[in-house]
Image (cartoon, rainbow, N blue to C red):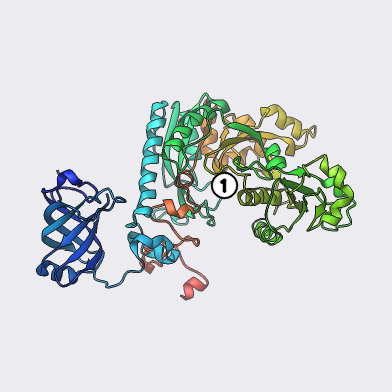
Amino acid sequence: MMQMRTHTCNELRLQDAGKQVKLVGWMENVREVGNNFAFIVLRDFYGTTQIVVESEEMATLVRGVNKESTISVEGVVRERSSKNPKLPTGDIEVVPEKIEVLGRCRYNSLPFEINHSREADETQRLKYRYLDLRNPAVKQNIILRCQVVAALRQAMTEHGFLEITTPILTASSPEGARDYLVPARKHPGKFYALPQAPQQFKQLLMTSGFDRYFQIAPCFRDEDARGDRSPGEFYQLDMEMAFAVQDDVFAVLEDVLPPIFAKYGTYNVASAAPFRRIGYNDAMATYGSDKPDLRIDLTCKDASALFADSAFEPLQGKTVKVVDISDCTLTRKQIEKLLEDCQVQSGSKGYWFKVDENGELAGGIAKFVAPVKDELGKLISLSPNTLVVVSAGESAVKSAGVMIKTFGAACEGHMDKERYEFCWIVDFPMYEIGDESGELEFCHNPFSMPSGGLDVLLKAERGEIDPLSITADQYDLVCNGVELSSGAVRNHDPEIMVKAFELVRLGEEDVKKKFPAMYNAFCYGAPPHAGIAPGVDRMVMLLAGESSIREIIPFPMNKNAQDIMMGAPSAVEQKQLDELHIALVGEQEAD
């Protein structure tokens, strides 16, 4: 029973004509007609209803109330003479007998029009997020998020997973991003860390005898913002399975995700199981990316050998990648603008040429390509009206990947946009050479099981194989060019774990020091286990068809990791700093 209202603003229909009702909500708009006649649009969480004021007394009352004030309306439902077929309540209106102001808006003007808030400056939207969320289009994304999370919970429970929460205050751990540190008042000079992920805890649950775990887990990472990444905090569908291999994890998500994407997505077509599996090296060679958008039919080819002695210096002796785009109608100006956009994203200049209607090369770098036309024609299609874009140099692969996505979306007929296309990227490198250190480092998750186990690590240690050739039982789930998740079969054997770390110059004592709980737990008999953690925010972003992740987060930070609505981060009182044994230095101290 609703005590303050008899109906919502999306509930009344023509069959309710003649009923005495009471509605509450925000006064979205007022249109006065003469001295004693006015139309009010009343909005609540559920929708809108038209209120028609027909008395001078009530018109005077309404005239003194600002838009976005909350009001209560008691009156009679009647059929509208001028119906609005675009509204669920468009056949009726309410004639009020009593209007009461419940919460007055004390400002004559708003920072932005509620129903057009998405057109406003982002800073204004974030500062007045509580107003932005009144926009039904913005609110719908948050409703969608709630529905998706509920569906994920139900599906995981039906698959035998237990929802278990893990600690928020924990120890700092080297997991790839900067930690958010929390000073420990009772332990001067020591700090908790907010978890970058529940990685160690969920593995410890597997060693504790739990078989299937999940949670909608908050994760905290001090990293820069991107379109598909919010700074500060994010949520993921964290899951782990004991006595499991890679295929077990794949089977669960291939069963859980497609129905949710098909039901709640902007597009109602989603990949069916099994998802396509692509090796990391193959993905980079074919798509120029480990996050390929399989809705695009373009691929890249390596033409380095053909241009080894090219007269065009940017290609000469360089890694050269080419992408052929059939039936392309883009103009020279459009092509060069798209290549400029690609350069901004990849940091590498791109080149182009076309095949005209007569099969001749024209435009861009055509004269430098002409000497190898026949050989190139064996590698890619050079049929009439084909555009070929070219990348070269150290960033050739990355640049080709950017070109595929940019030109695939821009050239008609090369991208089936209205679908969700999943794939697994598998066989990631276990190690890489660090950009800063110049030495061998873990490429991704150090807790992953190397493919080949201890044997392959010993071969690398003896110099029989290159450590860079070792792959890990790691995998990424990609949808429409967005990385939804990373996961792995875990390294549950202390002997294999120590050997894996020894290759990056860390011994057993280092492992014990950095990961004491997990190392000790594994020494008590750990089951083979595997897991993954799809990002909830990115998932909902894809389902909503949004390009920015901030559109689906109730109270997001801006690109500089600031909550400008709440004023965070903020200065604190000296007393608080003293209790935590913290002294500010440098510019902060001077302030």
Q: Residue furthest top?
A: 243
Which residue is more in the foreground, 428 or 63?
63
| Position in image of residue 574 (x %, y %) | 38, 68
Q: Mark 1 points at which residue?
A: 174
What amino acid is found at the position of numbered circle 1 in the picture? Pro
Eyeballing the image, is 152 above or below 568?
above
Query: Horizontally, is 528 left or right of 9 in the view?
Result: right
Q: Who's the residue at 65% across and 34% down the image?
A: 278
Which quadrant of the figure has residue 115? bottom left
Which quadrant of the figure has residue 81? bottom left
Q: Who's the residue at 52% across and 51% down the image?
A: 228
* Residue 193 in view, yes or no: no
**Secondary-structure class at tag 1:** loop
Which residue is more in the foreground, 329 or 450?
329
| Position in image of residue 415 (x %, y %) | 60, 44
Q: Who's the residue at 14% across and 43% down the image?
A: 1
Query: Horizontally, is 394 left or right of 241 in the view?
Result: right
Q: Which residue lies furthest to the front in this view?
A: 81
Eyeballing the image, is 95 above or below 451?
below
Query: Horizontally, is 352 left or right of 202 in the view?
Result: right
Q: Residue furthest bottom?
A: 590
| Position in image of residue 544 (x %, y %) | 44, 47
* Residue 253 in view, yes or no: yes
